[in-house]
Image (spheres, rainbow, N blue to C red):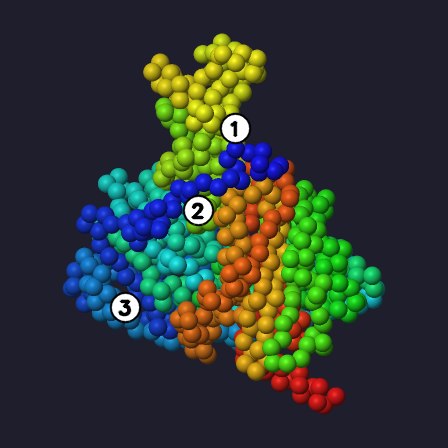
Amino acid sequence: MSASKHQIVGREFPRKDAVARVTGAERYTVDIALPRMLHGRILSSPYAHARIVSIDKSEAEALGATVLTFDDVPKLRYNERIITIPPVLHKDHTVLADKVRRMGEAVAAVACETEQLAEQAVRSIKVEYEVLPAVTDAHEAMKRGAPPIYDTVMFGEDEIAIENNVACTRNVDEGDAEKAFTEADITVEGQFTLRKVYHAQLETKSCVCRPEPDGGLTVWPTTQSIHNVRILLGEIFDIPLSKIDVRRVPIGGTFGSSIQMNAPIPICAALAMKAGRAVKLTLTREEDAHDHTRYGCTIDLKLAAKQDGTLLGADMTLVADIGAHNIQAYSFLGVSIGWLVSLYKLPNIRYRGTAVYTTKALSCAMQGFGNPQVTFAVEQLIDELAEKLDIDPIDLRLKNYVGLGDTFWGQGPQVKSIVQSDGVPQLMRRGAELINWGGRKPPQEKQGRFRRGIGVGRGFHTSSAGAPQPGDVIDFSGAMVKVNIDGSIDIVTALMDHGGGTHEALAKLVGEELGVPFERVHVVPAGTQTTVYDCVTHATRGVYAGGGAALKAATSLKKEILETASHYLNIHVDALEMKLDPDAGQAVIFSPAMADRTMTLEELAKTCWMESWKTLAAVESYRPTSCPPAYVSVFIEVEVDTWTGEVTTKNAVMGSDCGTVVNPVMAAGQLEGGLSKGAGYALYEGCDWDSDGQLTSRGYWLDAKIAAFGESPPIGNLQTFFADSYEPTGPFGAKGIGEAAMNPVAAAYANAIANALGVRFYELPITPERIMDKLADHANEDAES
């Protein structure tokens, strides 16, 4: 459905939080200040792997500090991310460390009257450690005799042994992969190395907790799921959930780093309960950098094809470095095979996935949850296959991609649905036209110091983790929509907006359904005591699933509004309609056959109020039964300096199939942001640890560099566009965009660099040093031949 047919959806309005954000008036967790609030600090381990022999906290207590050690907190083991159902959840985390398993792990915590005193107190704590060997390589960690990081963990309610640091495995076999490779006319393969990457979100993790007189807690956290934080705090501290209110606070970006309940939250809660006063606890940037990363992994991938380019099958082995704690590694292994088989039709599959503990920062979701890693491998091999078969890479992709009417695995074997909207052909053809794909030359025709190349990457992300039947992943949202007596609308939801405009989209969807002007629809402040459950803002589900819940509630409310108006207008409800009247500036209820009998929504709500009848409101929960692919195409033109190895982005074209575009400018911003984050992943970013487990990559601008403004294409050289598609299961035809925007970017850069230089890179990031080394090797090979 075209946006022009809508009065609100797809149109631009002043952003509701714009003034607060640009003036600094927006209140994030770090801005929360409560009366008599204490300030917390964490004592972080200086070692990556160690036993805690003793802790002397006497000096800190002499300073008046409230002090916590492992002896002061519940010993319950939990998983910080509870999107997986409890019976199949691995649990190895405790509030404070029983044993150090990563550098920066919290071994104690304090709360004091001032930040300065808290810093003094935490530095006064003396810890005796028995230092153990660090384990920084996942493949080495699996070898017999490697230092054990865990002896046992919990799996559901059972304690299980951990052998050779293997956290879990997942194998998938479909069809007959061995036969596919035997019968193949051609195969391509490679081993791809993807490093851990720090999320580099603007806001470090923070929390404010206030103990309540009834024994409960009020919590203002950095999180993507207020309800999951509530559930975990109730479980850990044995508090009825009715006594815990977790408030929805604006968040300064996450990129997936706060899907789980962040480590400072239960520590802050424990400090507050012990002190009997409110406590604020905020991680420093260094502490935050030790706390979370993208999953690092190695991927061995092999594809089989016929001479005409038809794909026959794939063999993939993935080893994931999950770091010190298992944040749903089993799910990560599942989605990784889902990304592969949802990109291209592969009737025969052999997959072996292994998740391994190391003494490094824990791995968690980061923009794609494994999708950028798998797509980086697949899209390069597709290009190599096209080159060997002398087929245009775009034609090969269009011949084999999973599209309209095909079975789509989404986020793994248990998340399957049928593709019902597909803008891929338009994305590929239009993108190729805009980047001048026809003028692309092979690398052997390029000479001189500066060499240009054009590369393509196509990808997708799921819009939620919905499926026809429930699996082991929890995915549903809820919302309440109510009419105020002036005809304005409140949306009450636990859904988090990471800054990309999700709440704006909800207001547009509800306003469109009810015919209420955008400026009179508001997503109101809320917490877990005032909202129904929403699982978490992840999996590019905000507009599709969270918006779907809000639209479902608005649809129910609209039915109630018409039934109520029918009573006052004395017109049968089936003869009534409701729409936005621009002249009245509000929603009007009317009958086309009786034009003189109308009521505004304000008149109706005010009459119900004056007659002491009711509030017009509706609350609904919504479980998506599909997770439609949000397709993205990326075309990159780079220039490589063969004297220095520097890569410059000259031109970029990004196309999105997100169904009905609800927020056009913000949707384009998602594509631009995806390009920037993807460029960082491709060219600059990565975390490194030395043999002692110490993080050596620190600082945004040096050895842990992220992409800066100057490393984006010049103004005017980035073009974005949207496919003309409509998702029948989505709210007003919409589906997702966020994570999809970044997933294929690194692959597009790798393919562009290969087109420029004639050499390929299977390891990220593709740094100038790696380029110069590869060019030297390539020159030596040419000389020897």
Label 2 Cα neighbours within 10 Å, binned few <14 / some 14-19 / many ≥20: many
Query: Label 2, on which residue?
Result: 497
Q: Are marks 1 and 2 in contact (CB under 8 Å)?
A: no
Report the number of discs.
Answer: 3
Label 3 and label 2: CA atoms lie apart by 41 Å
Residue 336 position, x and y percent, is 61, 58
Residue 147 position, x and y percent, is 48, 74
Q: Residue furthest top?
A: 570
Q: Which mark is residue 555?
A: 1
Q: From the viewer's perspective, is residue 313 above or below residue 735?
A: below
Q: Nearer the viewer, mark 3 or mark 1?
A: 1
Q: Quadrant of residue 356?
A: bottom right
Say which of 75 and 437 sits in front. 437
Give, as a three-letter code, the residue at label 3. Answer: Ile
Q: Quadrant of residue 762?
A: bottom right
Query: Label 3, on which residue?
Result: 55
Q: Disc 2 on helix, strand or loop?
A: loop
Q: Disc 3 on helix, strand or loop?
A: strand
Label 3 Cα neighbours within 10 Å, binned few <14 / some 14-19 / many ≥20: some
**Residue at 54 percent of width and 20 percent of height:** 577
The tag earlier along the polypeptide, 3 or 2, is 3
Label 3 and label 1: CA atoms lie apart by 59 Å
* Residue 312 in sight in this render: no
